[in-house]
């Protein structure tokens, strides 16, 4: 799906299906340096399972135009604008990494528009190493390589993959290449600048699920668990051998957890 | 230290984590045609490409997938599709990117069957190819038309051993908004990484150096994921609605891996050039030792070049590492680990002497293959390239007296001794 917003084209995958009136909306939000492509094995799957799927490219990412948004609050506001544009009153939000922070910001700004929240490999705050931010400005390719390496678990480093012939390393690197220059730095600074996540999480009333990774070097498990503890109505799953990029590293498990959670 | 495993490690490990159920350290051979679905949802999801997995071995197979993931890893690509042969790989790429009315630009310095596919078969389906000399880059640029879909090339031409200035070819392709597709069989990822030079798609005959043992035929399409298929309207097979799968748009849904998904969804599904799981297993055994074998191939090739160059019965020797090779400087720049283990040479006395040489070797094998662990020799003009015209042979850098030598891994002293006695037999034959 492509449409205009604030003078720029927005792309969002619907999982290959037109919307059906009355179906719940399921919104997937990607992490820093990523795009809708990280959800390739979720968006189509849930679009054919009774959901109106919207897997967005935030501005400056892959097929969406414009510049990357400077902070998590701006990303949440943009997401709410997208919902207004598409006349989506309420949705289930699934956020990976930085997308999980956007989950929290949306829950803070517009709790009435949130049906359920799913946090995938994330936490209530994501401090970012200053060296990585600086590297993303001066040695972008090196930063992308490091993030891809840190973002994937041991099986992905062995090129194990449930999609025949795929390399999660190769796809991770190329996905970042498709984003607008400079967007990675903006994303990393947005993550680093987000505060108050635990306070927001403590106020969330809707059902939530956290799916965390045991081998996560980007948002270590212990921080994700702290978020899960604060969320009052939470289901927690830990994928012990996955790295940070759960949607591509453990798609079958994540999809099963999602199916169970959405059906509950 | 790299962020990821080095080539030597990938050659042994990539694509396979030891089986958690059976504990098998080796890659198991999944000799099956089909796979149990978990339930009706799972079956529908696999058919609809909603999630990864295997449904029928014509499309994918767990053993073949290990091979694919290993090759993708070693080349630094986003994905790989293995298939029945290197020729199947080129056919898959050509038919996924080009349709009736489209056009391809190719270097003329190619393997004979590659020439035949592009020159004689594809035109019957409405796809024409313009052939240009790999050194004439102005002609290459001029040959590109509005309907040109890609530039095809071999880095080291077979059998002429011309070395392509790939960086300049990529510049020409980028300017035209089309990808470079390279047959990288002769270099393997040990000698050259095409994606790091801007090539977008690699085709391999895995039968050759990658397998190395000469027991299994196989091919691969490796997707670099570095080409923006959406930058223009030249690639509707990837950027517009597919005829099946509810009109899926591969570029939008899979981005860098769009070509691979089309190859899988249409190429493997409709054409069916599947690689057998057992052949995939054999090829994996070979790939495990590729880096060590390539070191030896290169050192033996260098020694044989020296030997032949100084032999009184040899009229000429062709290898890109020789200073008189027209592409010597290019080879030095882009192939620092070695310019391959293929050598061309002529035996004094012409075709009759060449024939006597071929029939007199005792250690080297006279057969139609290259890249085997064993040393191989053949007379291309009467065999591998006998189906192409004299004009195309000349364009490909092929002469009537040429002996094509694929240097193997034997003791170099034994090889020299064998060649010496065969060259003496050739001398006696024409004396």
Image (cartoon, rainbow, N blue to C red):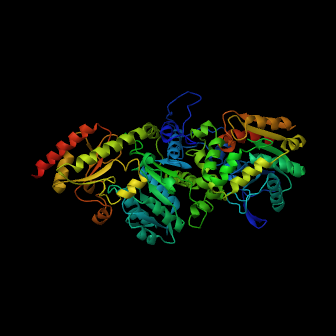
Measured along the vertical axis of the image, is residue B136 above or below residue A16? below
- Is B358 left, or right, of B112 in this rendering? left
- Find residue B143 and report its horizontal and vertical position in percent: 44, 71
- Find residue A257 and report its horizontal and vertical position in percent: 74, 39
- Is B45 left, or right, of B226 in this rendering? right
- Is B268 left, or right, of B410 in this rendering? right
In this view, the residue farthest toward the left is B431
- Residue at image point 46% right, 40% down: B280
Identify which residue, B217 or B130, lies in the foreground. B130
Residue B84 appears in the picture as rendered: no
- Find residue B334 and report its horizontal and vertical position in percent: 43, 54
Measured along the vertical axis of the image, is residue B113 above or below residue B361? below
- Residue at image point 68% right, 57% down: A182
Identify which residue, A20 or B228, lies in the foreground. B228
Identify which residue, A262 or A216, lies in the foreground. A216
Residue B81 appears in the picture as rendered: yes
Task: Classify the position of the N terminus of chain B by image quarter.
Answer: top right
């Amino acid at each position: 799906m492509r449409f205009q917003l604030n003078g720029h084209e927005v792309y969002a995958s619907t999982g290959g299906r037109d919307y059906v009136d009355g179906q719940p909306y399921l919104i997937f939000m990607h992490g820093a340096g990523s795009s809708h492509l990280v959800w390739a094995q979720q968006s189509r799957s849930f679009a054919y399972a009774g959901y109106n799927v919207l897997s967005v490219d935030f501005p400056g990412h892959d097929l969406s135009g414009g510049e990357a948004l400077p902070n998590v609050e701006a990303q949440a506001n943009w997401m709410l604008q997208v919902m207004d544009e598409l006349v989506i009153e309420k949705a289930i939000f699934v956020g990976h990494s930085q997308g999980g922070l956007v989950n929290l910001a949306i829950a803070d700004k517009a709790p009435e528009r949130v049906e359920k929240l799913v946090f995938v490999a994330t936490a209530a705050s994501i401090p970012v190493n200053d060296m990585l931010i600086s590297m993303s400005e001066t040695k972008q390719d090196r930063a992308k390589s490091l993030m891809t390496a840190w973002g994937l678990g041991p099986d992905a480093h062995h090129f194990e993959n449930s999609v025949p012939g795929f390399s999660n390393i190769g796809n991770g690197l190329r996905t970042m290449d498709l984003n607008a220059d400079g967007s990675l730095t903006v994303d990393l600074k947005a993550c680093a600048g987000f505060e108050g996540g635990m306070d927001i999480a403590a106020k969330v009333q809707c059902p939530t699920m956290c799916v965390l990774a045991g081998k996560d070097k980007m948002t270590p498990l212990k921080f994700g668990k702290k978020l899960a503890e604060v969320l009052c109505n939470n289901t927690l799953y830990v994928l012990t051998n996955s790295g940070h990029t759960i949607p591509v590293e453990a798609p079958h498990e994540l999809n099963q957890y999602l199916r169970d959670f959405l059906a509950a | 230290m790299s962020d990821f495993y080095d080539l030597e490690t990938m050659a042994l490990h990539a694509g396979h984590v030891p089986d958690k159920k059976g504990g098998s350290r080796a890659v198991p051979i999944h000799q099956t045609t089909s796979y149990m679905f978990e339930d009706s949802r799972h079956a529908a999801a696999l058919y609809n490409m909603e999630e990864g997995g295997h449904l029928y071995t014509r499309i994918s197979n767990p053993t073949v997938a290990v091979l694919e993931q290993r090759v993708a890893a070693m080349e630094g690509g986003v994905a790989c599709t293995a298939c029945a042969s290197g020729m199947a790989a080129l056919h898959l790429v050509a038919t996924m990117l080009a349709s009736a009315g489209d056009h391809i630009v190719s270097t003329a310095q190619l393997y004979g069957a590659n020439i035949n596919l592009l020159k004689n078969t594809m035109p019957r389906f409405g796809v024409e190819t313009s052939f240009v000399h790999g050194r004439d880059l102005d002609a290459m640029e001029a040959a590109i038309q509005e309907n040109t879909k890609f530039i095809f090339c071999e880095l080291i031409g077979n059998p002429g051993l011309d070395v392509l200035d790939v960086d300049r070819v990529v510049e020409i392709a980028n300017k035209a908004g089309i990808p470079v597709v390279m047959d990288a069989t002769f270099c393997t990822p040990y000698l050259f990484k095409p994606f790091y030079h801007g090539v977008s798609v690699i085709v391999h005959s895995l039968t050759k150096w990658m397998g190395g043992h000469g027991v299994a035929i196989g091919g691969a399409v490796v997707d670099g994921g570095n080409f923006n298929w959406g930058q223009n309207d030249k690639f509707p097979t990837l950027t517009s609605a597919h005829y099946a799968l509810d009109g899926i748009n591969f570029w939008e849904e899979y981005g860098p891996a769009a070509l691979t998904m089309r190859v899988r969804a249409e190429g493997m599904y409709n054409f069916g050039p599947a690689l057998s799981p057992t052949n995939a297993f054999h090829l994996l055994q070979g790939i495990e030792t590729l880096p060590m074998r390539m070191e030896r191939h290169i050192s033996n090739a260098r020694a044989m070049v020296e030997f032949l160059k100084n032999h009184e019965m040899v009229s000429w020797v062709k290898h890109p590492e020789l200073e008189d090779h027209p592409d010597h400087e290019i080879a030095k720049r882009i192939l620092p680990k070695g310019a391959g283990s293929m050598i061309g040479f002529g035996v004094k006395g012409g075709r009759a002497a060449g024939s006597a040489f071929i029939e007199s070797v005792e250690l080297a094998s006279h057969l139609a293959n290259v890249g085997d662990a064993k040393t191989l020799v053949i007379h291309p003009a009467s065999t591998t390239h006998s189906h192409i015209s004299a004009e195309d042979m000349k364009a490909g850098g092929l002469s009537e007296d040429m002996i094509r030598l694929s240097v193997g891994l034997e003791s170099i002293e034994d090889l020299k001794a064998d060649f010496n006695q065969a060259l003496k037999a050739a001398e006696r034959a024409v004396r």
